Image (cartoon, coloured by chain):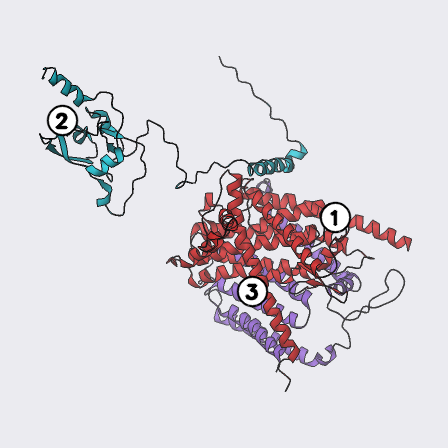
Chain colours: A cyan, B purple, C red
């Protein structure tokens, strides 16, 4: 059984009852704080360090060959809880050499940043690793229309990130090896 | 009429007007504020007489302390414009009015008769007694603080002691009245 | 028909009015910059940098100096004042209009009136005479300060009452009770000081502020002679200026904004400036009474020459002491937590007042003994 020990509180001494020594100590603390380095970040000029797993604005990325990775499967559109994503699927023209074997591509891809809740489901669900929530955190605009990111804007924000798979290259190799799926 | 006269009339109107407005205003807060105006006006008249000490005491004691308590109580009790209405019958009001008139006339008559004898050359200031080093000198009439103090501590020693005693009695009375005695119920 | 006003008097009156404007300008500027100091010092004590962005366009391009001023936020008071001017003027529907408009004025006017008797230096004239620099060096200066500053409570009480809202009302009531309570201790704490200075045999008499300051020239400062009086006066000063730890009337955590909850825009600005003007004047008066005024350090004669340079240095030294005290006000505010209301009343009535009384009696005895000895030696 737990044992309760009642501690007698010592009666305050005279100097403690005047509070003056305590006040002096407090004043000393605040005074010494004045000369310590400041923690303020001068925001627009100094930006905070963004950690790698930060979930910022969702963006579309291209592979290192400069091809768009999105195949407009629309999974992100379906999974998006606030229905912020709208995709118009489109096909890839046959005659584009650098986009051989790319099956499909979005004709238009819109993310409404007024609706987006930065949940990251789109990134999680994407089978092509084409949509990423990156380190961009301040999106602003003067009108509602400005806040809808279209395809160009999304690719501009996303840029290129290293790819582990090179899916389209592998497909091309497979075909030259005579192994069409 | 010179500038000082103009100031005198200004402050005279201020103090009398403030007093009248105090009596006639319906709302207690307004009445209190008018009374402050009146008191400050009187203080300004003291300043015109070059009696700064009296003027400042007037403001300090009446406007600064007593009226704050008045205002405080008015606000705390939330007394509205209707307070005190219909408490007095016309008969009683008439009697009080008559008494006030008699008092006013009496004061005016007394002041009118004794006005000449109040001239400053026949000083109403006390003949001050010898100072402690034995040399006898009397302070001339002045409005300086030191002469006030000197007068209070010499000629008016008894009155100041008596008034101090009365204030002490009042203070003790307040302490007795406001003190909660747990066994008062038993006494009944 | 008497002459309206003698020719010489006109000049004198105009000069006085000019000086009065100068003085109001100086005190208001100091009040404005106290607000900045409050923001800056609080920021520094909390590890922040405080306002450092406001700048006038042409000042920004001065090398070194311009960015420094910007970094110190020197133009922030200007921006703050303009903000108060240009905000929407809102008058709630439930207020008593007349007193609602009157209250800020009543709060500001006493704060600015007390400065008339405030001495801030000495003028050494070429012919060897010395005169005090003050708008009016009254013989009863300290009483004048008490009298006028006691009128300031009406501003707060009326603001609380006329706003017709419970928070404002509570703030007003608390403030008036607090100010009445601490006025007593404040006055009592100064009595021994004047007893000491006006002792028979000394050349000073009366209750003049300049006499008090001059009595400390080359000798001990009064806060060394009477530390207890200085302490009580300082605590009461904090209470009278409604500063933390005594900011009962505002106490934003339990009363929203206290007496100025219903005030906005420029009317709130006036309350704000009045509060800081009180601090400036209070610091100056404490400097005059306990910190030797415009005189150099205790036990050291003024090192500056007795000419206009000395006058300027004296005024500067006085300002330096006052600014240090303003800093002290801010420093204490960001160090101590707020008292509970009953603690404030308890401290005022059953601690400070008896202490002030005991202090008075002890010094009465000391002064009497000294006087008796002096009389016996004569």
C-alpha gap between disc 2 and disc 1: 90 Å
Q: Chain of mark 3?
A: B
Q: Dot 3: what SS?
A: helix
Instruction: Please state the horizontal and vertical placement of residue C92, each as a whole percent of the image.
Output: 38, 57
Return the residue found at the far bottom: C1
Q: Residue A103: x percent and y percent?
A: 12, 26
Residue position for label 3: B36
Q: Left or right: A149 with respect to C173?
A: left
Q: Are marks 3 and 1 on the same chain?
A: no
- Camera-side residue of B27 and C140: C140
Q: Position of residue A139 (x, y in %)?
A: 29, 40
The numbered dot on residue A102 is 2
Q: Which mark is drawn over residue C298?
A: 1
- Does residue C50 lie above or below C20 as drawn? above
- Give neighbour class at mark 2: few <14, some 14-19, many 20+ (Cα, 10 Å): many
Q: CA distance from mark 3 to mark 1?
A: 43 Å
Q: Residue at x 39, y 37 (%)?
A: A47
Splitting the image into 4 quarters, where does residue C197 fall?
A: bottom right
Q: Please identify the quadrant where the N terminus of chain C is shown.
A: bottom right
Marks 2, 3 in one chain: no
């Amino acid at each position: 059984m737990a044992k309760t020990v009642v501690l007698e509180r010592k009666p305050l001494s005279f100097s403690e009852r005047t509070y003056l020594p305590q006040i002096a100590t407090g004043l000393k603390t605040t005074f010494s704080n004045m000369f310590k380095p400041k923690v303020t970040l001068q925001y627009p000029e100094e930006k905070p360090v963004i950690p790698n797993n930060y979930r910022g604005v969702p963006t579309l990325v291209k592979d290192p060959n400069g091809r768009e990775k999105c195949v407009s499967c629309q999974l992100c559109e379906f999974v998006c809880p606030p229905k912020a994503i709208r995709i118009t699927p489109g096909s890839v023209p046959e005659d584009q050499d650098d986009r051989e074997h790319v099956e499909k591509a979005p004709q238009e891809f819109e993310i409404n940043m007024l609706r987006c809740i930065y949940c990251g489901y789109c990134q999680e669900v994407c089978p092509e690793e084409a949509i990423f929530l990156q380190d961009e955190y301040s999106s602003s605009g003067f009108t509602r229309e400005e806040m809808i990111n279209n395809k160009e804007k999304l690719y501009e924000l996303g840029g290129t990130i290293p790819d582990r798979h090179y899916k389209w290259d592998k497909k091309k190799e497979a075909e030259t090896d005579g192994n069409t799926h | 009429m010179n500038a000082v006269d103009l100031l005198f009339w200004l402050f005279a109107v201020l103090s009398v007007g403030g007093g009248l407005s105090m009596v006639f205003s319906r709302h207690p807060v307004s009445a209190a504020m008018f009374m402050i105006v009146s008191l400050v006006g009187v203080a300004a008249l003291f300043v015109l007489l070059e009696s700064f000490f009296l003027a400042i005491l007037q403001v300090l004691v009446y406007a600064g302390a007593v009226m704050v308590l008045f205002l405080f109580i008015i606000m705390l009790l939330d007394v509205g414009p209707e307070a005190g209405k219909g408490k007095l019958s016309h008969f009683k009001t008439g009697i009080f009015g008559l008494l006030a008139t008699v008092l006013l006339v009496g004061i005016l008559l007394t002041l009118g008769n004794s006005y000449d004898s109040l001239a400053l050359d026949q000083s109403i200031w006390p003949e001050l007694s010898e100072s402690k080093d034995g040399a006898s000198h009397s302070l001339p009439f002045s409005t300086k603080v030191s002469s006030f103090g000197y007068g209070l501590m010499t000629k008016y020693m008894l009155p100041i002691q008596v008034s101090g005693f009365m204030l002490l009695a009042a203070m003790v009375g307040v302490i007795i009245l406001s003190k909660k005695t747990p066994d008062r119920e038993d006494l009944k | 028909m008497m002459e309206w006003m003698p020719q010489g008097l006109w000049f004198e009156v105009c000069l006085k009015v000019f000086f009065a404007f100068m003085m109001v300008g100086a005190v208001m500027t100091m009040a404005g910059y106290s607000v900045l100091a409050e923001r800056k010092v609080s920021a520094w004590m909390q590890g922040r940098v405080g306002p450092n962005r406001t700048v006038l366009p042409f000042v920004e391009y001065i090398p070194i100096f311009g960015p420094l001023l910007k970094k110190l936020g020197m133009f922030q008071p200007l921006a703050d004042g303009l903000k108060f001017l240009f905000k929407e003027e809102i008058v709630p529907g439930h207020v008593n209009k007349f007193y609602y408009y009157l209250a800020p004025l009543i709060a500001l006017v006493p704060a600015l009136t007390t400065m008339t008797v405030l001495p801030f230096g000495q003028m050494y004239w070429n012919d060897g005479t010395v005169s005090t620099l003050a708008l009016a060096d009254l013989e009863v200066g300290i009483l004048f300060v008490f009298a006028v500053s006691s009128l300031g409570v009406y501003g707060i009480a009326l603001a609380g009452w006329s706003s017709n809202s419970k928070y404002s009302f509570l703030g007003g009531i608390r403030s008036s009770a607090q100010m009445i309570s601490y006025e007593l201790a404040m006055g009592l704490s100064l009595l021994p000081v004047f007893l000491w200075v006006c002792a028979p045999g000394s050349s000073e008499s009366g209750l003049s502020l300049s006499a008090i300051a001059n009595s400390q020239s080359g000798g001990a400062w009064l806060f060394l002679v009477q530390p207890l009086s200085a302490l009580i006066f300082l605590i009461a000063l904090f209470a009278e200026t409604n500063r933390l730890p005594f900011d009962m009337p505002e106490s934003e955590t339990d009363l929203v904004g206290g007496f100025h909850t219903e005030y906005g825009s420029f009317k709130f600005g006036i309350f704000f400036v009045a509060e800081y003007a009180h601090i400036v004047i209070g610091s100056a008066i404490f400097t005059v009474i306990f910190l030797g005024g415009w005189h150099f350090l205790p036990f050291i004669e003024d090192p500056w020459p007795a000419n206009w340079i000395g006058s300027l240095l004296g005024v500067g030294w006085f300002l330096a002491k006052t600014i240090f005290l303003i800093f002290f006000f801010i420093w204490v505010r960001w160090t101590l937590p707020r008292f509970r209301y009953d603690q404030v009343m308890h401290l005022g009535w059953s601690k400070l007042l008896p202490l002030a009384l005991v202090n008075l009696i002890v010094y009465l005895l000391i002064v009497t003994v000294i006087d008796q000895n002096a009389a016996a030696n004569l």
